[in-house]
Image (cartoon, rainbow, N blue to C red):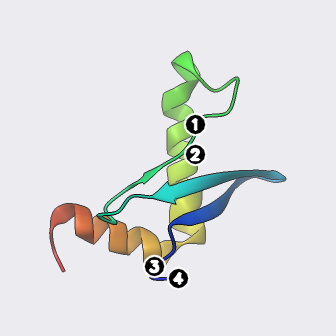
Amino acid sequence: MKHQNKITVEVYENFKLELTINENRDGYNFKTPKGWGGRHYYHFCNLVDYAFAEQYSELEYELRMNLRGAK
């Protein structure tokens, strides 16, 4: 799991989203599905973050430490 570039996170039951880990391994990107733009975007990003932290806790910790610069 250390060198994965793409992972799949289940945000809701039967609703999965593909996240792409950036090269610096300090964050991720995803394509927002239709219907979650505008005022719903912030809430959706929080849901993705919670799901990611729950399903990939070790990877989430690694990304957070890389973001802070601690190794």
The residue pinned by badge 1 equals: 44
Q: For the residues labelled 1 and 2, say whether their Cβ atoms are less than 8 Å apart.
A: yes
Q: Secondary structure at mark 4?
A: loop
Which quarter of the figure has residue 37? top right
User: Residue 68: which disc?
Assistant: none
Q: CA distance from mark 2 to mark 4?
A: 22 Å
Of discs 2 and 3, which sits in the foreground? Answer: 3
Q: CA distance from mark 1 to mark 3?
A: 26 Å
Q: Is residue 43 left or right of residue 64?
A: right
User: Residue 47: which disc?
Assistant: 2
The residue pinned by badge 3 equals: 3
Q: CA distance from mark 1 to mark 2?
A: 5 Å
Of residues 27 and 49, which is closer to you in this image? 27
The residue pinned by badge 4 equals: 1
Indicate the amino acid at tag 4: Met
Question: Which residue lies at the image location 39% right of the left edge and 58% below the top edge?
Answer: 22
Q: CA distance from mark 3 to mark 4?
A: 6 Å
Indicate the amino acid at tag 3: His
Indicate the amino acid at tag 1: Phe
In this figure, what is the number of numbered marks?
4
Label 3 CA crowd tier, 10 Å (few <14, some 14–19, many 20+): few
Q: For the residues labelled 1 and 4, say whether their Cβ atoms are less than 8 Å apart.
A: no
**In the rendered image of this protein, does residue 60 appear above or below residue 45?**
below
- Mark closest to the chain's N terminus, 1 or 4: 4
Of discs 3 and 4, which sits in the foreground? Answer: 3
Of residues 31 and 36, which is closer to you in this image? 31
